[in-house]
Amino acid sequence: MKVIVTDQAPGAIGPYSQGYEVNGFVYTSGQIPVDPATGAVPEGIAAQAEQSCRNVGAILEAAGSCFEQVIKTTCFLADMGDFTAFNEAYAKYFISRPARSCVAVKELPKGVLCEIEAIAVKS
C-alpha cells in the first residue's frame, strides 16, 4: 500500500489520507471544493463541482493515474436540486463515464455543496 500525498489538492483535515494506491488501484478520499493554494471555497455549485473535480484530478495525477482511468465515483450533494448543474461540471472531467453513485446528504464539511471520491486504475 502506498499513501498518496500532493500539495495540489487540499490536505487531509482529519485522521485520513488524500488517497491510497493498492494493487494497481487508486482510491481517493472525498474531495470538497477547497482551493489548495488559498484555502478558499468558490461560490455556487458549478464552481464548487469544478474545484472538487480538479482536486480529485490532482490526487489521481500524483498517483500516476488520470480521469480516463477512473472506474467508479461516489458523489455527495448537499441539495439534489443542484444535480443538473453538478452533472454539467462533472461531465467535463469524467469523460470516460465511470460507474457512479450520487446521493444527497444533510451536510458536508465546511458547509460546501458537493464532494467527490473516486476509484481508478493506475496508468
Image: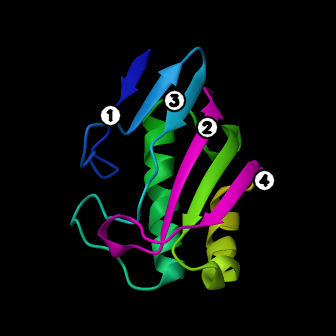
Q: Residue furthest left?
A: 38
Disc 3 marks a residue whose amino acid type is Gly
The disc, 1 or 2, on the residue closer to the chain's N-terminal end is 1
Q: Of residues 48 and 96, which is closer to you in this image? A: 48
The disc, 4 or 2, on the residue closer to the chain's N-terminal end is 4
- Residue hosting label 4: 97
122 is within the stretch colored magenta: yes
Image spot of residue 53 (x, y percent): 52, 59
Tell me the number on the disc at residue 64.
Answer: 3
Circle nearer the viewer, 4 or 2: 2
In the image, 41: left or right of 44? Answer: left
Q: Secondary structure at mark 3?
A: loop
Contact check, label 2 and label 3, Cβ < 8 Å: no
User: Where's the N terminus, which quadrant?
Assistant: top left
Residue sitting at x 63%, y 27%: 123
**Is residue 76 depicted above or below 87 in this figure?**
above
Circle nearer the viewer, 1 or 2: 2
Disc 2 marks a residue whose amino acid type is Ile
For label 4, the crowd category at 10 Å Cα-Cα, with few meaning under 14, some 14 to 19 and many 20 or more, is some
Q: CA distance from mark 2 to mark 3?
A: 13 Å
Display colour scheme? rainbow
- Residue hosting label 1: 5
Contact check, label 1 and label 2, Cβ < 8 Å: no
**Is residue 97 depicted above or below 72 in this figure?**
below
